[in-house]
Amino acid sequence: MIFEKKPILDPQGNAVKDLFAAWIILNNPAQYNSYTTEMVKGVIAGFQRASADNSVVAATAGVTKDVKPGTVVSGFPAREHHIARRLWALTAQLPDMAKRVKELERMVEELRKGVTVDSSAEDDR
């Protein structure tokens, strides 16, 4: 197991002073990074180390299958990091999207009934 602290970046890509993400990396290629007892102990130790470090703001492990060397993954289940970041951003938008879908469904239903659709209701979102 490899424990690594990587700096948290602000929206402009600059490192935020004294804030880090903990990377707990399983490194057991001889057994395809399988969860051996020793690997599980290492993951537990990594999370304990991250929990005790006040500069760490995130610690995640969710790899459930082999990952190609050099691939950066995050989240659970583990996905390529750029995909996981897009999913996190979309997840934050879900409440607004749900409201928009509900309003669109209402408008479609009114159109089916031949009722004039009041688009000013969209402003209430």
Image: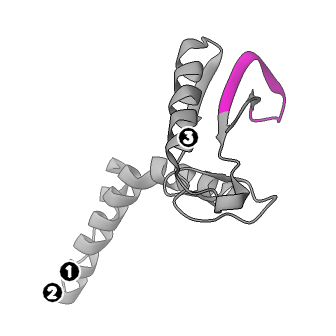
Along the viewing direction, whichever of 68 and 123 lies nearer the viewer: 68
The N terminus lies in quadrant: top right
Query: Pointers 2 and 1 in contact (CB under 8 A)?
Result: yes
**Which residue is tagged 1?**
109
**Which residue is tagged 3?**
38
Q: Is residue 61 left or right of residue 28?
A: left
Q: Residue at x 71, y 48 (%)?
A: 27
Compared with 67, 85 (above or below) is above
Compared with 27, 32 (above or below) is below
Q: Residue at x 52, y 52 (%)?
A: 35
Closest to the camera, between mark 1 and mark 3, is: 3
Which percent across, then down, holds residue 112? 20, 88
Q: Is residue 6 left or right of residue 50?
A: right
Inspect the image, locate mark 2, and give the three-letter code of the amino acid beneath it: Lys
Where residue 78 sits, quadrant-wise, is: bottom right
Task: Provide the major secondary structure of the magenta segment.
Answer: strand
The magenta segment: 9-22
Is 21 a magenta residue? yes
Helix, strand or loop status at disc 1:
helix
Inspect the image, locate mark 3, and give the three-letter code of the amino acid beneath it: Glu
**Which residue is tagged 2?**
113
Where residue 45 sits, quadrant-wise, is: top right
Task: Judge the density around disc 3: few (<14), some (14-19), many (≥20) Cα neighbours within 10 Å.
Answer: few
Task: Judge the density around disc 1: few (<14), some (14-19), many (≥20) Cα neighbours within 10 Å.
Answer: few
